Amino acid sequence: MSGEPARRPLQSRGKPWAAALARRLTTWRVAPNFISALSVVFAGAAGACLPLAVRAASPAAAALLFLATAAGIQLRLLANLMDGMVAVEGGLGSKTGELWNDLPDRFADALVFAGAAYAQPGSAWGVELGWAAAVLAVITAYVRVLGAAAGAGQHFLGPMAKQQRMATMTAACVLGAALALAGRAALAAHVLTAALALVVAGAAVTIARRLLTIAGALNARA
């Protein structure tokens, strides 16, 4: 990541623990672009764990894999937070940082939702919902970047921006772990289906809101 780009408003950026971790990474001279790439590794691990969780041989193994998925998603978000803080506050940004700041996120979203697509055995719409969530996640970001390219600024509107998408999937995985331990692994798969349906519906609303906001900003300039 580089320079001083438009940044997603995050309360966590002002937390003491986040500032301390960013300072430590800056002291170690960890490149922001490397942190951005690492977010894809975490997302890929999360996506790989999900199909294994619903097919695990024991409730304990299923719960562990669901929790590993949740951890991977949260580590992906932590990397997304740290790359910007190390680049901007730490002064380690590079000329290619904008590319690394945005593109890995698109792969990360797709990997999480592709994994969820194949983690619902027996679901009539599981695969379709997973891939729809992946596509719509990419489009929400595309619309944001498109608005910036058109001169209307970057708009991080929800209700299903990146943080909300990942929070929804994290909650579904934590609930899935609890259900697996309770011997209700089949129900855990249905929770994932419901979470994906929520992401798809919310992402569609998000895209519409962003487009309307961008169009309004452009029309106001005419």
Image (cartoon, rainbow, N blue to C red):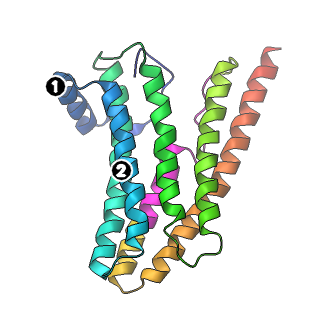
Residue 78's x, y, as percent?
Answer: 33, 41
The amino acid type, in three-letter code, at marker 1 is: Trp
Residue shown at 62%/31% (left/top)? 144
Could you tell me which secondary element the residue under label 2 belongs to? Answer: helix
Above or below 6: residue 107: below
Please tell me in which quadrant of the rendered image residue 53 appears: bottom left
Residue shown at 82%/21% (left/top)? 219
Please tell me in which quadrant of the rendered image residue 23 appears: top left
**Residue labelled with disc 2:** 74
Mark before the other along the chain sequence, 1 or 2: 1
Residue 168 in magenta?
Answer: yes
Is 64 on the left or on the right of 127, as rendered? left
Q: Nearer the viewer, residue 85 or 102?
A: 102
Q: Which mark is residue 28?
A: 1
Is 92 on the left or on the right of 101, as rendered? left
Q: Nearer the viewer, residue 72 or 7?
A: 72
Above or below 151: residue 76: below
Find the magenta span and give its range.
153-172
Q: Distance between the residues labelled 1 and 2?
A: 22 Å
Do we see residue 197 in this rendering? no
Disc 1 crowd, CA 10 A, few/some/many (<14, 14-19, 20+)? few
The amino acid type, in three-letter code, at marker 2 is: Gln
Disc 2 crowd, CA 10 A, few/some/many (<14, 14-19, 20+)? many
Residue 178's x, y, as percent?
Answer: 36, 76
Residue shown at 78%/27% (left/top)? 216
Residue shown at 64%/47% (left/top)? 136
Could you tell me which secondary element the residue under label 1 belongs to? Answer: loop
Is 105 on the left or on the right of 209, as rendered? left
Image quarter of the N terminus: top left
Residue 25's x, y, as percent?
Answer: 21, 29
